[in-house]
């Protein structure tokens, strides 16, 4: 890993307007000018914010990438390293601020130092076919415009709330991480790659001020994590910044989460009908009929200016329809439906399987009716501790089934016909409240449920 001294110019106007000190006794004009130039140069690595001094550093991440950070230093330490003369060249600001912008960036705003980083890429007309091919491979033709709108909003309107992206596939080397790298390379210090532990930690300072928060190898099934993500993804005000051994502060949160996972259908806990999530199954290169490109990183780097120019010129495909910008129907994928189905309780899942199996065993029936006691009896071998209220809740709250009035009905029993294939259903002798299921409903569950 290559490290280099930070030579970022904090405020050119500030440095250009500082006159050189009068030459000291016994020194030549040339020596003194050389000394002052060196102090000015070194001072560019520091800022004073309020009463505190900071060094602008690039801290190594666990994946050996570098991200911009501010290292608090004592004034005496800076003097020890660079002599007292450097202090007058260090620019001074009232406080930090965080104002995200990519097309009208300002480092200093009304005397406040902007922690958001300016993009080093400058839009330029050119070819960006490699980046477009990556997006098309990951999202497919049907969701290609959604992905472009997403990136365009990220670039031109960073404060717009957007759906949480989850890209997943069991297979490796599919290109999902390549898309994450495109985002990471475009937004540079305003993007960060973190792991599951970083997201679950009490200390969020490493990611809470970033625009793009990329979580690799995601496996976060705890409901508490999902609730936190939901809260942050729709946040419009300030959130608390927790940093180890430092007092809590607040910052406007505008981050967008991008998750990468090999855990298909179970990387995160996603509640049924939650519109905050956009989940995509990424195909292999063979499935798309393309080949892995060993030079793709270099091509992406070269094409970013042209891609930003493309985003500047492009018209949005979709209009603003919800708090996550898009109408949720735009990104309703089969993979998201898989999460919706998996989010229901174990009881609800077993009821679904019971209904599907029953229709398979009675191929001539288009409607079956079951009471709560019937379902409990059918599921006893699989759910030994099943309770009446649990069945009722699963039926009415999770499967959206309404109880039907008391009536006599024919009981089609999976258990009976499996134990005796000659079993013949008979009309139930009791007048029961029941629930009605259709064959069409069962076929729909079967097509979207995956493996039970």
Image (cartoon, rainbow, N blue to C red):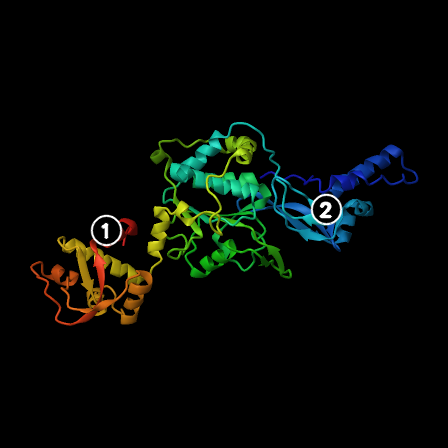
Where does the image place residue 22, in percent across and percent down from the top left?
A: 89, 40
Local packing at callout 2 (Cα closer than 10 Å; few below 14, some 14-19, many 20+) is many
Which residue is labeled 2 in the image?
46
Q: In terms of sequence position, does the residue under pointer 1 or pointer 2 come before the other? A: 2
Disc 1 is placed on an element classified as helix
Local packing at callout 1 (Cα closer than 10 Å; few below 14, some 14-19, many 20+) is some
Residue at the farthest left position: 422
Q: Report the front residue among 428 and 416.
A: 428
Looking at the image, which residue is at 43% across and 51% down? 277
Quarter holding the N terminus is top right
Please say whether residue 84 is visible from this viewpoint.
Answer: yes
Looking at the image, which residue is at 50% across and 34% down? 297
Q: Are marks 1 and 2 in contact (CB under 8 Å)?
A: no
Residue 180's disc number: none
Using the numbered discs, state the Cα–Cα distance from disc 1 to disc 2 in whole angstroms: 65 Å
Tell me if residue 341 comes above or below residue 311 in the rendering.
Answer: below
Quadrant of the rendered image containing residue 117: top right
Residue 443's disc number: 1
Disc 2 is placed on an element classified as strand
Where does the image place residue 301, in percent across and percent down from the top left?
A: 54, 33
Where does the image place residue 120, in percent across and percent down from the top left?
A: 62, 37
């Amino acid at each position: 890993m290559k490290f280099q001294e930070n030579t970022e110019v904090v405020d050119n106007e500030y440095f250009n307007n500082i006159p050189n000190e009068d030459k000291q006794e016994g020194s030549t004009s040339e020596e003194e000018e050389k000394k002052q130039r060196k102090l000015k140069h070194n001072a560019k690595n520091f800022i004073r914010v309020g009463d505190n001094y900071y060094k602008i550093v690039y801290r190594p991440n666990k994946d050996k990438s570098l991200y911009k950070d501010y290292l608090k230093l004592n004034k005496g330490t800076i003097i020890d390293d660079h002599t007292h003369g450097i202090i007058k060249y260090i620019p001074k600001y009232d406080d930090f601020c965080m104002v995200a912008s990519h097309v009208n960036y300002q480092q200093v705003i009304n005397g406040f130092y902007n922690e958001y980083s300016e993009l080093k890429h400058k839009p330029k007309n050119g070819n960006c076919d490699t980046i477009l091919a990556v997006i098309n491979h990951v999202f497919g033709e049907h969701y290609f415009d959604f992905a472009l709108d997403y990136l365009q909003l990220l670039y031109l309107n960073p404060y717009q709330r957007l759906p949480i992206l989850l890209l997943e596939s069991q297979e490796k080397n599919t290109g999902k991480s390549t898309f994450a790298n495109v985002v990471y390379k475009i937004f540079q210090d305003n993007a960060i790659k973190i792991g599951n532990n970083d997201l679950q930690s009490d200390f969020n300072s490493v990611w809470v001020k970033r625009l793009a928060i990329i979580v690799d190898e995601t496996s976060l099934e705890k409901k508490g994590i999902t609730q936190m993500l939901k809260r942050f993804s729709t946040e419009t005000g300030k959130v608390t910044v927790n940093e180890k051994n430092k007092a809590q502060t607040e910052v406007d949160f505008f981050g967008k989460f991008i998750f990468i996972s090999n855990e298909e259908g179970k990387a995160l806990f996603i509640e049924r009908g939650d519109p905050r999530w956009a989940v995509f199954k990424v195909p292999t290169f063979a499935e798309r009929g393309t080949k892995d490109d060993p030079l793709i990183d270099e091509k992406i780097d070269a094409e970013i200016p042209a891609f930003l120019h493309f985003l500047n010129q492009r018209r949005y495909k979709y209009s603003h329809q919800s708090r996550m910008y898009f109408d949720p129907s735009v990104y309703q994928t089969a993979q998201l439906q898989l999460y919706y189905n998996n989010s229901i309780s174990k009881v609800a899942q077993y009821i679904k399987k019971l209904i599907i199996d029953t229709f398979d065993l009675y191929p001539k029936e288009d409607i079956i009716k079951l009471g709560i006691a019937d379902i409990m009896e059918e599921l006893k071998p699989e759910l030994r501790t099943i309770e009446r209220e649990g069945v009722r809740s699963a039926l009415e709250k999770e499967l959206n089934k309404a109880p039907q009035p008391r009536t006599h009905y024919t009981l089609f029993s999976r258990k009976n016909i499996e134990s005796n294939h000659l079993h013949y259903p008979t009309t139930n002798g009791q007048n029961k409240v029941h629930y009605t299921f259709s064959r069409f409903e069962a076929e729909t569950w079967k097509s979207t449920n995956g493996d039970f």
